[in-house]
Image (spheres, rainbow, N blue to C red):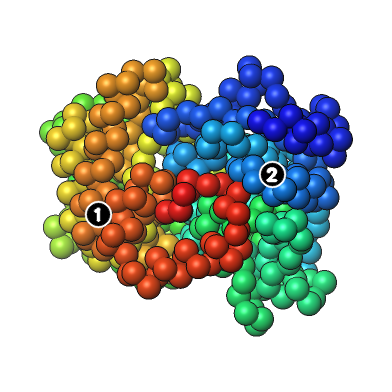
Amino acid sequence: MNERLHERLVEALGEARVVGDPARLAEYNDDFSEADPVTPALAVLPTTVEQVQAVVRLCAETGTPLTPRVAGTNVAGLAIPVPGAVVVDLRGMDRIVSVNAADMVAVIEPGVTQQQLKDHLEAIGSGLTFGYSLGPRRSSVLANCVLDGLTNRSLKYGAMAQWLAGLEVVLADASLVKTGAWALSDVPFARSPLPDLTGLFVAWQGTTGIVTKAAVHLAPGHPLGERLFLLAYSTHAAFEAMRRLVRTELCDDIGALSWPTGKMMLGVGHPHPVPDEGEPRYFLYVDLSAELPEEMAYKKKVLCRVTAELTREGHGFEPPLDVGTLVRLNPAMDKFASFPTDLDFLTDHPGGGLTWVGTYGPLSRFDDAADAGAAIMVRHGLAPVIVSRAMKGGHFGVLRFLATFDKAARAQVEHVRGMNRDLLADLTERGFVMYKTPAWALRELVAKMDPGFVALLRKTKALLDPQGIFNPGKLLLP
């Protein structure tokens, strides 16, 4: 590391906001995933946009790579730096800048967590809510948006990038840009109607700039809400129910989780790869909300009608159960009572490792893809932990295969790497596309992509980051 750069960063941010101690730097060297750890040369902890600009300006002068990071809760190695890099820890930029209740839009900084945003919206009596992911409560809202993740409102509103109304970004020359209507209006109400430059910073994994603020749409928070669970005895029954329910346009969220997921939630650390005889294969959770009791009653009536139709057709289902009943039967189910939540059976187990192959794809192909992925996991000796969700009115959905492992056991690390390669190859052939895609997967996929698309990616990256300092090693590019 250039000692002069270290000194100048201290001058710009203050000594307390530049980390050079090896023990503290080790906090930035990995995430939950099987990606190899890399300790950065330095970490900086800016609290203002001006400080981020100063960091970018100084690192650009020396060609020093920068890796933005917030909570470190991702499972794709996206915030693991390259050797010699400076990690830009954005947790200290944690202001909810504004909430415009009339136009249902908020402006937030990168360090704002899921729980923080939920608490704030409730505290100010906004009557509004947001989409919360299955990631930990401390996860960054902004990071999930710019990585195009998903939430418990994805059925209605789509992947998280579609909640973005505009961004504020520090570019490679340390200049600042606002995108969307925000480029002209003081109300960042939409990405339209100006050219949609927000997309230059969505799913680019921090390789085109450092996002310092996001304008995000909010959603009405209806006074009545229920979460119901359906037990399905076959893969086809689970996903056929999902496909039919999305067409009623009555649900806020529809997810399906495989039987080992439920067992892990109830304390079984390593479920057997093969289900017990007569055991449900999936449980679906369905979120309903309403303004009036009669509206809620109508939605539940339609839900029961759909499940009754499926039962008459020979699909195995249990009658809907509300989450309150499940929690009374087993308090461990409280983790699914509301979002955001902490799924500690995935993130806080003794081995510490969590990996996934998460894909977006067409609902029409979920049955075969889920069964094929489950077979791959069983072949590798692991229980098929599958999480799925319908998104954007059912136009597509997420199909995600998860595994926990011991990060300290090299054999387990290599084992899950091999399994993930097999899952990725199979799902890609079926028309599914991995999201929050790690570098190893992009190396596998680039040869299969449209060559014009890959060329345009490279041209765009070269235009926005000519020195290649923003999060190198991610998104195809060295």
Q: As shown in the figure, which amino acid type bears the numbered disc 1?
A: Leu
- Residue 192 image offset from top left, x and y in percent: 64, 78
Gap in angstroms between the C-alphas marked 2 and 1:
42 Å
- Residue 470 image offset from top left, x and y in percent: 60, 50
Q: What number is the disc on residue 269?
A: none
- Residue 368 image offset from top left, x and y in percent: 18, 56
Q: Secondary structure at mark 2?
A: helix
| Mark in the foreground, 2 or 1 | 2
Image quarter of residue 160: bottom right
Residue denoted by label 1: 427
Foreground pick, 320 / 389: 389
Q: As shown in the figure, which amino acid type bears the numbered disc 2?
A: Thr
Q: Secondary structure at mark 1?
A: helix
Confirm whether residue 122 shows in the render. no
Residue drawn at the location 38% of the way across and 36% of the way down:
355
Residue denoted by label 2: 62
Please tell me how crowded label 2 is: few (under 14), some (14-19), or many (20+) other residues with Cα within 10 Å: few
